[in-house]
Image (tube, helix red, strand yellow):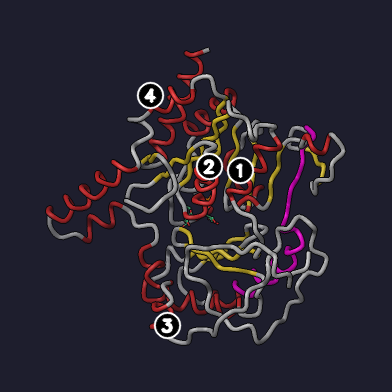
Amino acid sequence: MDLKSSNSPVIVDPLPTLALSSTIMTYTTPKSFSSMGLYLNCPKKKPLPGKIEEVRAAGWLDLMLASSPTRKRQNKDFINDVQVDDLDLRYHNWMVRYPSALTSFEAITSFGRGKRLVLFLDYDGTLSPIVDNPENAIMSNEMRNAVRHVASLFPTAIISGRSRDKVFDFVKLSELYYAGSHGMDIMGPIRMSELSGQHVECIRSTDSKGKEVNLFQPASEFLPMISEVFNKLGETIKNIDGAKMEDNKFCVSVHYRNVAPHDYAEVHQRVTAVLRNYPCLRLTHGRKVLEVRPVIDWNKGKAVEFLLESLRLSEKEDVLPIYVGDDKTDEDAFKVLKANNLGFGILVSSVPKDTDAFYSLRDPTEVMEFLKKLASWKEEST
Ligand SMILES: O=P(O)(O)OC[C@H]1O[C@H](O[C@H]2O[C@H](CO)[C@@H](O)[C@H](O)[C@H]2O)[C@H](O)[C@@H](O)[C@@H]1O
């Protein structure tokens, strides 16, 4: 794939784009990119903002400050009941547009009757509550049992920003399909197109139980670059109190959940200063986390399409995919389901948010309740 080709699809990222200079490049862009049409032009980056005001002007600082507000913290900041009531009112108004998947359960199941459901689940904030230390984002046994139960009834996949290995270590269920690194590392079933001899860029492998599976890693040629940038970012943020790196294999997380808000701009500036030398990497924003990833046309939405195809469940009218997730990156999957009228997304949020999901759930506890209800419904209806 020619990186300079003007025919490449362009990623449309709703977040502010990274304001960077492309003057110095220490890393050579991989030349032998595969021919799947996933690789995009490495964008020319704008000059690096020098002052906090410029970080704010680019929209990042407000995003970082607003990221992942918890209900508890908001309530604490509010000084009178009227404002708390106002928040509740806004949430209730929002839920008119994005009704609870629990209270709308009957509508969901009557739509799903006679259809084959496929479940896609995000991990952090969906199956496990958001916690200060990413290493401690443990999934409860009750949630694991609920996921195991639905997976015995419907094809089920976890699609996470974490590395595939790490999310498997948390979930520990071999009966699921896993996509790590925001969908850039998929372990799924052998694709039918492969069996019929068509060329698909997957690696044949075996899972933890020795079953033959396919590995799809569209960003594998970025691995050396990602590992180099991981080290540089670690070095640059090491003396910012509370900042923490996480290696997600094909992407890198820079956590600032435990950083004092007055240092947020500093975190952003240092990260963007490193990235100015890597025009083939881009920066996105999650819940108190900056995420660095390759500029390829691949995301959680594409991973959903890929898995549906691998499972021979794409373009079938009797298939109903449901995606449950809490974060900005899950919106790519919500969009794919909505745009193609395939199925629907459920946003996990306790505050009003713009979303392409159809329904909402407040938190992982409600997600668990929803999964249990789905399992009971399926068992009762067969
Ligand atoms: O796609 P996901 O499975 O939701 O992964 C997205 C990021 O999730 C994790 O970070 C988030 O959860 C942490 C644990 O609760 C929390 O400390 C952090 O502030 C959140 O952003 C994970 O650690 C990241 O690497 C993922 O990119």
Residue 90 is labelled as none
| Circle 3: element type | helix
Tell me the amino acid under the disc marked 4: Glu
Q: CA distance from mark 3 to mark 1?
A: 37 Å
- Name the residue furthest right: 197
Tell me the amino acid under the disc marked 1: Val
Of callouts 3 and 4, which one flags the residue occurring earlier in the amino acid sequence? 3
| Circle 1: element type | helix
Q: Residues within 10 Å of mark 1 (few under 14, many from 20)?
A: many
Tell me the amino acid under the disc marked 3: Glu
Of callouts 3 and 1, which one flags the residue occurring earlier in the amino acid sequence? 3
Which residue matches tag 1?
A: 304
- The magenta stretch is 211-233
Q: Evaluate if marks 1 and 2 touch, with contact meaning CB atoms under 8 Å apart.
A: yes
Q: CA distance from mark 4 to mark 1?
A: 25 Å
Q: Residues within 10 Å of mark 4 (few under 14, many from 20)?
A: few
Q: CA distance from mark 2 to mark 3?
A: 36 Å
Of callouts 4 and 1, which one flags the residue occurring earlier in the amino acid sequence? 4
Q: Position of residue 171 (x, y in %)?
A: 58, 39
- Name the residue furthest front: 7
Front in this rendered view, residue 139 or 363:
363
Of callouts 4 and 2, which one flags the residue occurring earlier in the amino acid sequence? 4
Which residue matches tag 2?
A: 337
Q: Evaluate if marks 2 and 3 touch, with contact meaning CB atoms under 8 Å apart.
A: no
Which residue matches tag 3?
A: 54
Q: Is residue 374 magenta?
A: no
Q: Evaluate if marks 3 and 4 touch, with contact meaning CB atoms under 8 Å apart.
A: no
Q: Position of residue 256 (x, y in %)?
A: 46, 66
